[in-house]
Amino acid sequence: MTDITLENSSSNSPATGTPLLEARGVIMRFGGLTAVNNVDLTVNTGEIIGLIGPNGAGKTTFFNCLTGLYIPTEGQVTYKGTVLPPKPFKVTQAGMARTFQNIRLFHNMTVLENVLVGRHTRTKEGIISAILRGPGYRREEAESREKAMALLEFTGLARKAGHLARNLPYGEQRKLEIARALASEPGLLLLDEPTAGMNPQETRATEELVFAIRDRGIAVLVIEHDMRFIFNLCDRVAVLVQGEKLVEGTSEVVQADERVIAAYLGTPYEATPEAGAAGEADGSIPASDAASDATPDATPDATDATPEEDQ
Ligand SMILES: Nc1ncnc2c1ncn2[C@@H]1O[C@H](COP(=O)(O)OP(=O)(O)OP(=O)(O)O)[C@@H](O)[C@H]1O
């Protein structure tokens, strides 16, 4: 992995272990359905935190509450001690960036252009000027291109800079989503199922990438169904079941918790591939409900390519 300097808004942040994101009593109701029920979660600087749970447990809804896509019915979310405005653009500007479960790239733009668009919260000219390449954009273009190329080096996509996003293999599209999120120079990166649809080799590479992101001073909150990925990676893991946080702790604590095993894992996670081979060689959840739905279509739908500006 190329050793480049990755600027981020946390570069001047306090020492590791200081609260960055604090969610308190978050409740999200859709009519009669309580999708997220009174969830507390803290992410400190320097941490990688996992969020796991069966399908429909409320993980993505909780992410949406954290990132301004949903206004929680109750509860509060703060970033660096400040209540976040319920606008995704402002949340990104504050220092939280995210990727989506269903990839949202500009499929007809190049890889480099996708990352440049991700910088719109850090440039004065904004997204429209970035797309139209107006005069204001030109002044910032050289610096932005340099930073975007550095991110493509960092994520291993530099040689694909001029390719159309839609022509990338699925695993690289997921990497590009991460590069684009990093372009906003976040202090906290939220990843929603970053390895969905990846083969084991790509999953291991993503694990290394997440460690490298953390080593650059960016905290990470990650939703994932691949238990080996989560338990290898995370400092702490929170388990959501039916909208409620069942347990939170180190990988060892969570794996050993009988409620988690009963409600979610089905069988105890085995740390070694040999031991796990009888169950899930790739570390995915053995529970049938999760495994069947965890992997999206292998081929992203190009017609569903319009990302939201406000990631
Ligand atoms: N916009 C919405 N309107 C109504 N119900 C919703 C909405 N979004 C999510 N839900 C419901 O909230 C519950 C939690 O869904 P959510 O997608 O957050 O779960 P999840 O844990 O992310 O699941 P998965 O692992 O399958 O992605 C589900 O019952 C879902 O149907």
Image: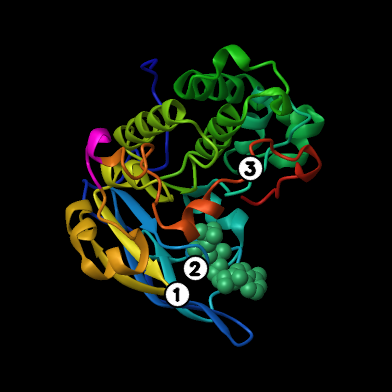
| Residue 28 x, y percent position in the rendering | 53, 77
Q: Does the magenta stretch include residue 271?
A: yes
> Is label 1 in a helix, a strand or a loop?
loop
The residue pinned by badge 1 equals: 242
Residues packed near mark 2 inside 10 Å, few (<14), some (14 to 19) or many (20 plus): many
Q: Quadrant of ligand 1?
A: bottom right
Q: Considering depth in this image, is 11 or 182 the residue closer to the camera?
A: 182
| Image vertical order of residue 51 relative to residue 112, above or below | below
Residues packed near mark 1 inside 10 Å, few (<14), some (14 to 19) or many (20 plus): some
Q: Distance between the residues labelled 1 and 3?
A: 25 Å
Exactly how many numbered labels are in the figure?
3
The residue pinned by badge 2 equals: 58
The residue pinned by badge 3 equals: 103
Q: Distance between the residues labelled 1 and 2?
A: 7 Å
Q: Is residue 60 visible?
A: no
Q: Does the magenta stretch include residue 262?
A: no
Q: What span is in magenta?
A: 270-275
Who comes first in sequence, dot 3 or dot 2? 2
Ligand 1 closer than 8 Å to label 2 CB: yes
Left or right of residue 104, residue 80 in this image: left
Q: Considering depth in this image, is 11 or 151 the residue closer to the camera?
A: 151
Who comes first in sequence, dot 1 or dot 3? 3
Q: Which residue lies furthest to the bottom in this view?
A: 32
